[in-house]
Every structure is written in C-alpha cells, then in structure tokens.
Image (cartoon, rainbow, N blue to C red):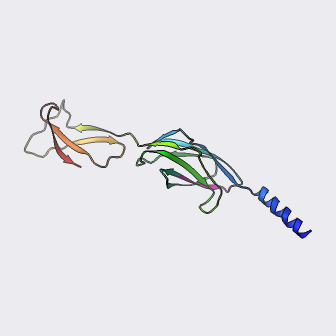
C-alpha cells in the first residue's frame, strides 16, 4: 500500500506541476531589422511570474533580460546586430530550470539601415577655401565604424580621399 501511495503522489505531482513554455512569435520566415521594435509572444503553464528572454543569432546566444511572464514583450532589436538567416528567440523560466522553448524555425535578422548626408558644406550655398581649416558635418543613421571623407573640385568627375574617420 505504501508503494501505491508513493506512485500516486509521484504521478499527481508530475501532472499538477508540469511546466511548459511555447514561443509563438517571432516565427520562422519572419524578418526582424536592427533598431526596429517587434512583439515577442509566448504561452506558458505553471511558470513563475518572470521569464528569461534570449535571442540567438547564428548559434550565439544573447540575453534580452528578465521580464514579467505576461506572454508579451516589445523588443527593440539592437542597432548593432549583424545579419543572420538563423535567428531564434529562447524563453526559460530561469537560468537553471529545464522549462524552456524557442521558435521551431529560424527567422531572418537584417542589419539596421545605414544612410549618411552631408550637412556642411552645402554645395549650393557654402564655400570652402583652400589653405585654411574648414569644417565638414554630416548626419547618419545606423551603425558605422568608419567614414571616408572625399572631395571633388569638378562636380564628382575626379574624387580625392581627405580622411578616414
């Protein structure tokens, strides 16, 4: 009788406390772009009030953070993320609990768009003079590790590099 009681208790505790997490989005085939915000959604059963979120890119795992277990999180993809065809979201109850899930098929991660525009000098209104220091200014979006500065004295037919910044 004692063994039967232990077996029933074990079965009951396994059924009553079975934990599960299921990642719903993003899912396979979705495209996420650096600097943009996307919804991470999941369902869970018998999980505590917080979960750990991670993203994986090309097999390397990065921590997003610990969030309340609401089934929803607005995630801004880092501006510095590198492109990958193998993106995954992984959700765990905590760092040491085996209850976890990640999307079944990979999503695509694209780098943040990059653009640059010169704000000074303006070719229509500004004049720069040789032999004295001149300022050059620009605005940019995205992440740029280096900027090449060129000058042309003949409308772009012949270009000379001034600096690599």
The region drawn magenta spans 47-54
Decide whether residue 49 is among the magenta residues. yes
In the image: residue 98, left or right of residue 160: right
Q: Is residue 56 above or below residue 122?
A: below
Residue ID at (26%, 41%): 138
- Quadrant of the rendered image containing residue 119: top left
Q: Nearer the viewer, residue 101 or 54?
A: 101
Q: Quadrant of the N terminus?
A: bottom right
Residue 32 screen position, x and y as percent? 48, 41
Residue 148 at what x, y percent from top left?
23, 44
Q: Residue furthest bottom?
A: 2
Q: Nearer the viewer, residue 52 or 157?
A: 157
Q: Main secondary structure of the magenta part?
A: strand
Q: Is residue 9 left or right of residue 102?
A: right
Confirm whether the magenta stretch covers residue 15.
no
Q: Is 72 placed left or right of 164 in the picture?
A: right
4 shown above or below 29 = below
At horizontal 44% and vertical 48% (from top left) the residue drawn is: 78
- Nearer to the camera, 154 or 90: 90
């Amino acid at each position: 009788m004692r063994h039967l009681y232990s077996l029933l208790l074990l079965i009951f505790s396994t059924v009553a406390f079975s934990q599960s997490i299921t990642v719903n989005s993003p899912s396979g085939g979705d495209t996420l772009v650096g600097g943009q915000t996307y919804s991470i959604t999941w369902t869970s059963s018998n999980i505590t009030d917080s979960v750990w979120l991670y993203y994986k890119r090309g097999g390397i795992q990065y921590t997003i953070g610990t969030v309340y277990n609401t089934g929803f999180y607005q995630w801004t993809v880092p501006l510095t993320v590198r492109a990958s065809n193998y993106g995954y979201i992984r959700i765990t109850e905590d760092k040491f609990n085996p209850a976890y899930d990640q999307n079944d098929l990979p999503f695509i991660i694209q780098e943040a768009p990059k653009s640059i525009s010169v704000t000074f000098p303006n070719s229509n209104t500004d004049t720069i003079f040789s032999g004295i220091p001149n300022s050059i200014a620009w605005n940019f979006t995205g992440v740029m590790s280096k900027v090449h500065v060129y000058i042309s004295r003949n409308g772009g037919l012949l270009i000379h590099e001034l600096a690599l910044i």
